[in-house]
Image (tube, coloured by chain):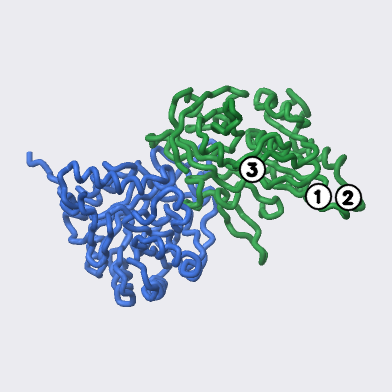
């Protein structure tokens, strides 16, 4: 679906980081956590292409009906610089929702891991997993017992949306490169620590619930810079925790026509093939990717 | 309602708005945006004899009003095209023109022969001009090699033939002339312009393939000039492609001498455009007083000073 929709509001939520709210019941009714939208300024040719943005969350009208979508973005270039000048009433072009979205979590404990602006898909993921909101016409249903959100940025001033996600009963574990808030170091340190304390690890005996229940004790959803996701994928493999990664690759169309956004995906017969992140992802099981 | 049908020698199209190879996937990807049956024709992504993995990413980068790409003809090969995509395409109710690229003349001929036996294709477009594949660009820069491929394909394949030309030549009219004399029903002008994008801070090229092909609104004036040059010099129908962003671009190409157009890069950033242009063309021709679209083709007047 390609439509032109009005901006409802634009709010600064962290340094160089904004939440853009767009009015569109159609988009809001269709979107799943982890899916994305392509956004551009209609009629302009510079910038030319749409840019992909994850669903931050749907927003509801006073009657509780989906009324529009929020996206959160970091100003990094030509398009995001232009976007930061938009205000209420401006009309923007959107197509989506696109991509597969995160799977429905089945684990007892969901570990969300974000690096930098990779936090943006996780508010909707947490709300859905907590059973606080249904997406794409599905009824709200509680899926997990606990959620821990490990979130790292360069410094405290880039941490975005903590006030949105904390009230959902999500345990926050923060890290900053400069130590201005939370752990002084990488978010992957937090993940390693959590996995060490909460999962059996390589040499441990299988806990009894793993034999008697089809519900795994933990699962990881991760989004951030590729080296960070690679590190999280290795940790997840060591601790035998299922892990899904949300990829971002340079993309021209968002719907599978251009073959730009490819990533290396392992093939059943061995080796790898380039697959399109926009239509086969952006969420992939970590073990399917050939880093 | 003006008559939109166009005839390019043996190639018959319900209207002159086609979609360019490599910008429309295999049409399935676009079904949610474009009423496919209304298009004048669909040219799916280039087919090669065997699967090609394509170039390493990044494969695209935006430039000022343009797009540089080096996809590298990522496709699953001719067998997979026939098994997975052809039936779907032929059921869409519009002309399907298969686009093929070979490393050498024999590869072009073998593919053309096989596709010529597939019932239902409206034509064949020869990609003798992809800038991102070594070997591919060579045919289209040389009039004799262009003629040799076109003539050879014509002998083994009964489908209407379109030669897709490269703009990366000194004189595109010489290549168009060669293609026409060798039996091309039409020429597509033009493929992308070789270009480059650099991250100077890192001292690195941005594209994985270092260089790529430039498309989008940035190239339209150059392609418009080429269409006009070929139209006044070579008696061959022209399909224009390059930076079409709206109905005025379509009409400019028709006035310059193109009989049909392809929508390319705009399919990425305005995926509904191709479908909307057909209605807009109808209205624009009606308001210009044209009974049919052919009346406006090649009507450019150069003022005498």
Residue B119 in the figure: left or right of residue B301: right
* Residue at which label 2 appears: A209
Q: Where residue B138 sits: x, y (%)?
A: 37, 62
Dot 2: element: helix
Q: CA distance from mark 1 to mark 3?
A: 21 Å
Q: Colour of chain A?
A: green
Mark 1 falls within which chain? A
Q: Where residue B5 sits: x, y (%)?
A: 24, 57
Viewer can see residue A8: yes
Chain in blue? B
x 87%, y 40%: residue: A197
Mark 2: few/some/many CA within 10 Å (<14, 14-19, 20+): few
Mark 2 falls within which chain? A
Residue A192 in the figure: left or right of residue B28: right
Q: Where residue A33 sits: x, y (%)?
A: 63, 40
x 57%, y 28%: residue: A61
Mark 1: few/some/many CA within 10 Å (<14, 14-19, 20+): few
Dot 1: element: loop
Q: Earlier in the sequence, mark 2 or mark 1?
A: 2
* Residue at which label 1 appears: A215
Picture quadrant of residue A74: top right
* Residue at which label 3 appears: A138
Tell if the residue under mark 1 belongs to the same chain as the one under mark 3: yes
Please tell me which residue lies in front, A136 or A270: A136
């Amino acid at each position: 679906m390609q439509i032109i929709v009005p901006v409802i509001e634009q709010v600064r939520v962290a340094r160089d980081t904004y939440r853009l709210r767009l009015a569109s019941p159609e988009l809001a009714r269709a979107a799943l956590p982890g899916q994305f939208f392509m956004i551009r300024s209609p009629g302009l040719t510079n910038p030319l292409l749409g840019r992909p943005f994850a669903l931050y969350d749907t927003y509801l009208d006073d009657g509780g009906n989906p009324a529009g979508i929020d996206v959160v973005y970091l100003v990094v270039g030509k398009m995001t610089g232009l976007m930061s000048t938009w205000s209420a009433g401006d009309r923007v072009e959107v197509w989506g929702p696109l991509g597969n979205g995160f799977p429905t979590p089945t684990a007892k404990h969901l570990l969300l891991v974000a690096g930098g602006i990779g936090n943006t898909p996780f508010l909707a993921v947490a709300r859905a997993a907590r059973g606080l909101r249904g997406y794409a016409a599905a009824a709200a249903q509680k899926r997990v017992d606990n959620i821990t959100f490990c979130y790292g940025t360069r410094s405290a001033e880039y941490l975005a949306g903590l006030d949105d996600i904390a009230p959902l009963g999500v345990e926050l574990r923060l890290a900053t490169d400069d130590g201005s808030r939370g752990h002084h170091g990488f978010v992957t340190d937090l993940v390693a620590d959590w996995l060490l304390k909460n999962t059996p690890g390589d040499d441990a005996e299988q806990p009894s619930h793993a034999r008697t229940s089809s519900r795994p004790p933990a699962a990881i959803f991760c989004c951030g810079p590729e080296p960070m996701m690679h590190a999280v994928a290795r940790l997840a493999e060591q601790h035998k925790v299922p892990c899904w990664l949300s990829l971002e690759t340079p993309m021209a169309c968002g719907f599978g026509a251009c073959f730009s956004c490819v990533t290396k995906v392992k093939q059943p017969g061995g080796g790898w093939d380039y697959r399109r992140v926009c239509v086969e992802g952006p969420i992939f099981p970590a073990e399917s990717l050939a880093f | 309602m003006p008559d939109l049908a166009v005839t390019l020698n043996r190639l018959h199209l319900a209207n002159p708005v086609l979609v360019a190879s490599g910008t429309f996937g295999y049409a399935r990807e676009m079904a949610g945006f474009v009423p496919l049956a209304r298009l004048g024709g669909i040219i799916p992504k280039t087919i090669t004899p065997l699967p090609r993995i394509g170039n390493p990413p990044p494969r695209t980068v935006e430039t000022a009003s343009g797009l540089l790409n080096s996809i590298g003809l990522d496709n699953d090969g001719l067998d997979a095209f026939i098994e997975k995509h052809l039936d779907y395409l032929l059921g869409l109710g519009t002309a399907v023109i298969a686009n093929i690229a070979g490393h050498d003349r024999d590869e072009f001929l073998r593919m053309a022969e096989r596709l010529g036996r597939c019932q239902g294709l409206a034509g064949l477009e020869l990609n003798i001009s992809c800038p991102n594949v070594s070997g591919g660009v060579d045919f289209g820069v040389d009039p004799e090699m262009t003629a040799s491929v076109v003539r050879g394909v014509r002998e083994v394949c009964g489908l209407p033939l379109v030669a897709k030309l490269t703009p990366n030549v000194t004189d595109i009219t010489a290549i168009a002339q060669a293609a026409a004399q060798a039996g091309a029903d039409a020429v597509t002008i033009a493929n992308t312009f070789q270009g480059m994008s650099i991250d100077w801070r890192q001292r690195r090229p941005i594209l994985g393939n270092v260089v790529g092909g430039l498309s989008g609104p940035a190239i339209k004036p150059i392609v418009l000039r080429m269409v006009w040059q070929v139209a006044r010099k070579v008696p061959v129908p022209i399909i224009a492609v390059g930076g079409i962003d709206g109905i005025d671009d379509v009409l400019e190409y028709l006035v310059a001498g193109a009989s049909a157009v392809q929508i390319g890069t705009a399919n990425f950033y305005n995926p509904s455009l191709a479908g909307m242009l057909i209605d807009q063309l109808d209205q624009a021709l009606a308001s210009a007083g044209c009974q049919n679209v052919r009346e406006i083709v090649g009507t450019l007047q150069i003022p005498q000073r």
